[in-house]
Amino acid sequence: MAETMTLRAYLDDVKRLLDRGAATEVISHCRYILQHYPRNVETYRLLAQALLQKAQEQSSGTLFDEAIEVFQRVLGVLPGDHVAHIGLSEIREHEGRLDQAIWHLERAYEQLPGNPMLHEGLRALYSKRDGDSRTPAKIHLTRGALARQYVNGQLYDQALIELRHALEQNPARLDLQVMLAETLLESHHVVEAGEVALQILKKLPDCLPANRILARLWLDNERPSDAQVFLDRVEALDPYAAAQ
């Protein structure tokens, strides 16, 4: 626990540096942390943000490419991570790839439905791509965003309906599969939650929510030896989550 708290305090300090625009220092600190915690997802998130910040300052294609790689690594652990999607949206807009920029910002908006900054960001991208006359005054919520709203309100049955419809249309969306697994667990459909989590891990073995779900299910069934492989991954990816 002491190591976890020390890492927590260190990451908080690094976040403050990032907020002050000290991108070079953040990159250095993150690379040092990764020598000791080589799979820690929060460190990768901060590293990606700092790389993007520095890339924007220097107009460096190499740094943009590095930021893309690290943001994608974050999404391999947390497929719905809104910070990673926002960062990738900014990069794709910089590249002039507006469809991809919109796609990533839509994914972020699904995690934070109703967020005014993301709403206006989406409208700006639509306007840039389609023109002001074809830009809607209000962004309609996708099924994923509706599901998130229902989950936030603990309306799990309605969320499951939206998620199943969304996955019928986009079966490869791993972020939706993660939300489905988490919602199934919260609504006490534990067997199906475990099945969905296992399917996710076949594609993303480091997916943090899926590993947490399976660790919890095995521990709830008093089978700690079966839980251990999943707990080990959780600890490597997020020691603070493992300590909880």
Image (tube, rainbow, N blue to C red):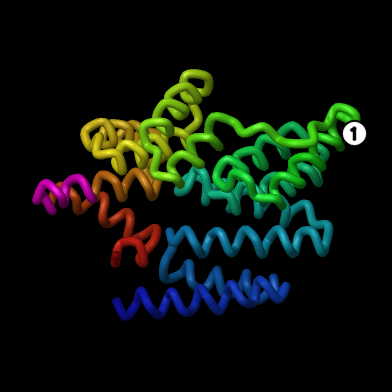
Looking at the rendering, which quadrant does residue 203 occupy?
Answer: top left
Q: How many marks?
A: 1
127 in relation to 82, above or below:
above
Magenta stretch containing residue 222, yes or no?
A: yes
Residue 244 or residue 187, whichever sits in front: 187
Residue at coordinates 37% horizontally, 47% vertically from top-left?
A: 209
Q: In this image, 48 relative to 120: left or right?
A: left
Q: Is residue 131 above or below residue 169?
A: below
What's the magenta region? 216-224
Residue 143 in the figure: left or right of residue 134: left
Left or right position of 185 against 206: left
For the residue pair 54 and 186, the one nearer the viewer reads as: 186
SS of the residue at dot 1? helix
Look at 72% across and 39% down and name the residue there: 101
Residue 225 % position (x, y): 12, 52
Quadrant position of the C terminus in the picture: bottom left
Residue 93, image x and y in percent? 78, 43
